[in-house]
């Protein structure tokens, strides 16, 4: 389902924030009063996967974004790190936790992840070491777009994260 | 597990230039994205073969592929692309939540009023707008004017609009867009025109409407015509597709793609006549995947003093963005429509002589 309202947000056990324009999404989160509730739910353990613009919104530090991001993932993210559309590219990439052959990764006006915090696990880097995928607990971030290639292995990884989180929530009912 | 939820229409990953956030899904691989980018292997091959035609391009992997060109349009879906003529306009558009801007020398209604020959905008103006905003910047080239397109590619614009709003440079041929690294968007009035542009390499389509009028009637007509064409193809048996392709003057594989996908093989926005949040939502409900707003924003509130006008235009821009995000929610549409000033005055298309209709340019 698509999430545009508070009610829809309450109905999900996991959330993907896909590609798009981070400036646009950041504004609309504020305009429709979703930013704080989303932040609260993520801090309470809602598994979230951000691709490209979604990853930008998850980051705690985003120079050059004129609205506050959701700010939950302990990384710095550099927007449009490779340049304009003409510099967009496709490349095969090894991703930790993804079994089998390398993933074909599509980078469109993509960001890169820098300064990962202590608890952030780097899942994929380009040959020169620039980080393009990482995980911190229930948060997953990719600079590229697995939603454009038909390769569902990262989706499977995320679904597993959601299942684990749901199982944990069931095992330990909230107090009170 | 009730947990995560099912997906959006068509089982397709939705790009989102809006706050649209898509819930994860219980079943993974088989249901994941079947991207428009993969419409046909032959197209992929061709686009790749001609990729990397100029000096830009980073140090990594493959550039200028069909997936990258059509993929950027996927990321704009659900968003609003606004015509801007100055860096200040571009700032207002970005601030309002536009997912991209179209850098122009004059908005279409002024082009209409001014007459004369409308050409690609000045390079300095486009470059200034590129420096001003972080969202993608599009710019228009005349139909068939492949050198204007080469210049726009050299500047580094993110998308070229081969546009009927400018005076055509070639009254027979369109630009061979497959040759370029930069992606193109083109206008159409029906399915055949859309597929002819896609065959030439357009990675995004917009219905033409009638630019600069503020009259939505042509936008509606063209969007309905595209969907009517798609439905006919979908309901036709396979052995009739070659004849449909012949009649539309398009490659058979694109007609087959349309039948399989139940939509155009690239993202389709609406353009030409959107003047209010209601107009924008109307086009979304009619099946547009996003909206171009030309004169609708920066020709609104014309009777106001400059300061008040800029504020009114910013409100209109923001309201149109919100209307596109919540296009199917009438109470939200009412909410965003409150407190707006006058929309652009506009001109009914029915009052225009045939010679002034821009949509008839290019076919």
Image: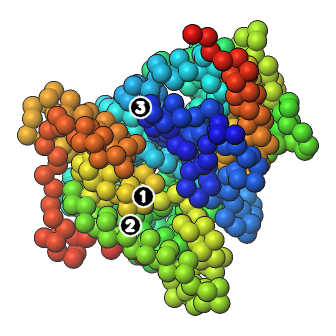
Q: Are marks 2 and 1 in contact (CB under 8 Å)?
A: yes
Label 2 and label 1 in one chain: yes
**Chain containing the residue with disc 3:** A
Mark 1 to mark 3 CA distance (whole Å): 20 Å
Q: Which residue is mark 1?
A: B288
- Find the residue positioned furthest to the right: A100
Residue displayed at 58% across by 34% down? A12
Is disc 1 placed on a helix, strand or loop?
Answer: loop
Label 1 and label 3 in one chain: no
Can residue A119 be seen here? The reply is yes
Mark 3 to mark 2 CA distance (whole Å): 27 Å
Is disc 3 placed on a helix, strand or loop?
Answer: helix
Above or below, B109 against B169 in this view is: above
Q: Which mark is residue B223?
A: 2
Q: Nearer the viewer, residue A54 or A165?
A: A165
Q: Quadrant of residue B326?
A: top left
Q: Which mark is residue A28?
A: 3
Above or below, B347 against B26 in this view is: below
Question: Which quadrant of the rendered structure holds the N terminus of chain B?
Answer: top right
Q: Residues within 10 Å of mark 2 (few under 14, many from 20)?
A: many
**Chain containing the residue with disc 1:** B
């Amino acid at each position: 389902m698509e999430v545009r309202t508070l009610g829809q947000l309450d109905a999900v056990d996991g959330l993907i924030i896909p590609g798009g324009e981070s400036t646009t999404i950041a504004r609309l989160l504020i305009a429709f009063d979703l930013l704080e509730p989303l932040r609260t739910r993520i801090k309470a353990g809602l598994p979230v996967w951000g691709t490209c613009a979604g990853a930008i919104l998850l980051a705690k530090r985003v120079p050059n974004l004129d609205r506050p991001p959701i700010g939950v993932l302990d990384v710095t993210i550099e927007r449009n790190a490779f340049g304009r559309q003409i510099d967009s590219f496709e490349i095969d990439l090894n991703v930790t936790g993804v079994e089998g052959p390398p993933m074909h990764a599509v980078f469109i006006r993509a960001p890169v992840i820098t300064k990962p915090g202590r608890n952030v696990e780097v899942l994929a880097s380009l040959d020169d070491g620039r980080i393009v995928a990482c995980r911190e607990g229930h948060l997953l971030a990719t600079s590229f777009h697995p939603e454009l290639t038909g390769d569902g292995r990262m989706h499977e990884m995320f679904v597993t994260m959601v299942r684990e989180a749901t199982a944990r929530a069931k095992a330990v009912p909230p107090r009170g | 597990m009730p947990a995560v939820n099912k997906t959006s229409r068509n089982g397709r990953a939705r790009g989102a230039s809006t706050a649209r956030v898509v819930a994860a899904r219980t079943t993974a691989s088989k249901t994941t994205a079947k991207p428009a980018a993969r419409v046909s292997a032959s197209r992929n091959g061709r686009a790749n073969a001609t990729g990397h035609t100029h000096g830009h391009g980073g140090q990594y992997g493959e550039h200028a592929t069909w997936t990258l060109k059509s993929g950027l349009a996927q990321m704009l879906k659900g968003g609003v692309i606004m015509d801007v003529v100055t860096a200040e306009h571009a700032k207002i558009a970005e601030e309002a939540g536009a997912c991209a801007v179209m850098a122009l020398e004059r908005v279409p209604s002024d082009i209409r009023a001014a007459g004369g020959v409308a050409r690609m905008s000045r390079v300095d103006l486009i470059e200034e707008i590129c420096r001003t905003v972080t969202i993608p910047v599009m710019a228009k080239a005349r139909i068939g004017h492949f050198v204007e397109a080469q210049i726009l590619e050299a500047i580094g614009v993110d998308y070229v609009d081969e546009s009927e709003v400018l005076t055509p440079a070639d009254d027979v041929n369109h630009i061979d867009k497959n040759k370029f690294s930069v992606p193109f968007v083109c206008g159409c009035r029906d399915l055949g025109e859309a597929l002819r542009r896609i065959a030439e390499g357009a990675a995004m389509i917009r219905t033409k409407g009638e630019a600069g009028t503020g009259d939505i009637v042509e936008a509606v007509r063209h969007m309905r015509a595209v969907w009517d064409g798609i439905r006919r193809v979908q309901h036709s048996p396979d052995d009739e597709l070659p004849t449909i392709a012949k009649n539309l003057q398009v490659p058979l594989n694109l007609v087959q793609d349309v039948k399989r996908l139940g939509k155009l093989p690239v993202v389709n926005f609406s353009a030409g006549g959107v003047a209010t949040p209601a107009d924008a939502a109307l086009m979304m409900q009619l099946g547009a995947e996003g909206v171009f707003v030309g004169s609708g924003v920066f020709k609104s509130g014309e009777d106001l003093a400059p300061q008040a006008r800029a504020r009114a235009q910013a409100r209109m821009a923001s309201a149109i963005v919100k209307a596109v995000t919540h296009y199917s929610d009438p109470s939200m549409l009412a909410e965003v429509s409150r407190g707006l000033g006058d929309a652009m005055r506009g001109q009914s298309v029915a009052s225009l002589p045939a010679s002034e209709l821009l949509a008839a340019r290019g076919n």
